[in-house]
Amino acid sequence: MTKKLYRSIDQKMLAGVCGGLAEYFDIDVSIVRLMLVGAALVTAVLPLLFFYLISWIVIPQGQPKAQA
């Protein structure tokens, strides 16, 4: 079974890109958000802003997880 990258519905603040990356790599979403902010500060924000906007457009939205 292959994993697919989707924007998260359950762990989203803005568009779900960081939540989707966290689910894909099976790590905490806070770590992904902190890494994104840190990389944005190092690269003068604009490149990461473009990455986030393009990811928002390109990555499809996932389905909500079934409640147990």
Image: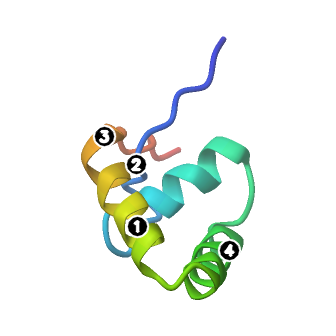
Q: Which mark is residue 12?
A: 1
Q: CA distance from mark 2 to mark 4?
A: 17 Å
Give yes or no for contact between labels 1 and 3 (Cβ–Cβ under 8 Å). no
Residue beneath disc 3 = 58
**Element on which disc 3 rests:** helix
Residue at image location 66% in from the left, 83% down from the top: 38
**Element on which disc 2 rests:** loop
Residue beneath disc 4 = 35
Residue at image location 45% in from the left, 43% down from the top: 65
Frontmost residue, 55 versus 14: 55
**Element on which disc 4 rests:** helix
Name the mark nearer the viewer: 4 or 1: 4
Give yes or no for contact between labels 2 and 3 (Cβ–Cβ under 8 Å). no
Q: Position of residue 2 (x, y in %)?
A: 63, 16
Q: CA distance from mark 4 to mark 1?
A: 16 Å
Q: Position of residue 28 (x, y in %)?
A: 71, 65
**Element on which disc 1 rests:** loop
Q: Position of residue 17 (x, y in %)?
A: 43, 57
Give yes or no for contact between labels 4 and 3 (Cβ–Cβ under 8 Å). no
